[in-house]
Image: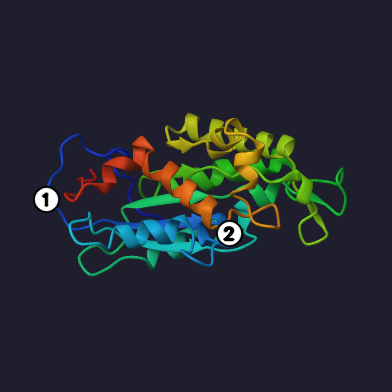
Amino acid sequence: MQTFPVHSSMQLSLAPKPCQPLKIIALGDSLVYGFGDPETGGWVEQLRRRWMLPNSSGHVLYNLGVRGDRTQQVAQRLEVEFRHRGELRNQVPDLIILSVGVNDSARLARPNGRNYTDIAVFASEMASLLDQAQQLCPVLFVGMVPVNEAKMPFLDCFYFNHADQYRYKEATRIACKQRQIPYLDIFDQWIVRGEAWRNQRLSEDGLHPNTLGYQALLEDVMNWEPLAAYHAPSAYQLT
């Protein structure tokens, strides 16, 4: 498998330097795709539109979310997607935003059924995905949204619950920490805000955010320090 040279630094330089707008890919599951938000298309689409406004940073953002994807499937398409998302002077992306894992956590057929991806297998696959991504360019990770457990099962066969979500998001957070990949813990942030707040921001299926939920998610992402530097009109130079 062909890979690309590792950047000498996975962080933004401290001072902004004039450069072309960055090419960024958001890769993951339905949370990236924006399913559940027919009005604004989800947080990635809203961020893409903001970066197209006059006097914005002008970054190009590709939405590569696929509904139902698990970690293994994202890993399988990562490098192909990466190699085919670039423009003119900048042939490959400068940044990867990952968001995947909730589908791996689902219980199959019944509330105490087996997890779709065994937790040990998931930890190994997540580690492999992160290592693969870091070989290509800098990486950021946006965590999963807590479900509405009272709405389960999803599609009459997938049982999601907070206990499993916590285990899988913790495995992801730890893997990111070990690799110095910034991780946005959406699960913990939304749990703290309370059940009533969350349920107002989840679709009827109990799994996907609604328009209000994606707006809240966008605000969480926009206020996240590792991504905040990218919003300035003068793009920061990646080294």
Q: Residue at x 19, y 61 (%)?
A: 54
**Amino acid marked by disc 1:** Pro
Which sits in the foreground, 115 or 224? 224
Provide the secondary structure element on which disc 1 rests.
loop
The circle drawn on residue 146 is none
Secondary structure category for the residue under label 2 = helix
In the picture, measured across the screen, residue 110 lies left or right of residue 79, that is right
Indicate whether 30 appears above or below 17.
below
Dot 1 corresponds to which residue? 18
Q: Residue at x 53, y 39 (%)?
A: 186
Left or right: 10 as drawn, with respect to 79: left
The outermost residue toward the left is 18
Q: Nearer the viewer, residue 227 or 96?
A: 227
Residue 76 visible:
yes
Q: Nearer the viewer, residue 90 or 105?
A: 105
Which is more foreground, mark 1 or mark 2?
2
Q: What's the distance in space between the residues labelled 1 and 2, CA to CA?
A: 34 Å
Q: How are the residues colored?
A: rainbow
Is residue 123 shown to the viewer in this render? Answer: no
Write down the residue under mark 2: 30
The residue depicted at 28 percent of the width and 64 percent of the height is 91
**Residue 56 sits in quarter:** bottom left
Local packing at callout 2 (Cα closer than 10 Å; few below 14, some 14-19, many 20+) is many
**Within 10 angstroms of label 1, few (less than 14), some, or many (20 or more) residues?**
few
Cβ–Cβ under 8 Å for marks 1 and 2: no
Residue 117 x/y as whole percent: 73, 48
- Which percent across, then down, holds residue 133? 45, 49
Q: Quadrant of the C terminus?
A: top left
Q: Amino acid at mark 2?
A: Ser
Is the residue 110 above or below the residue 184 in the image?
A: below
- The residue closer to the viewer here, 214 or 197, is 197
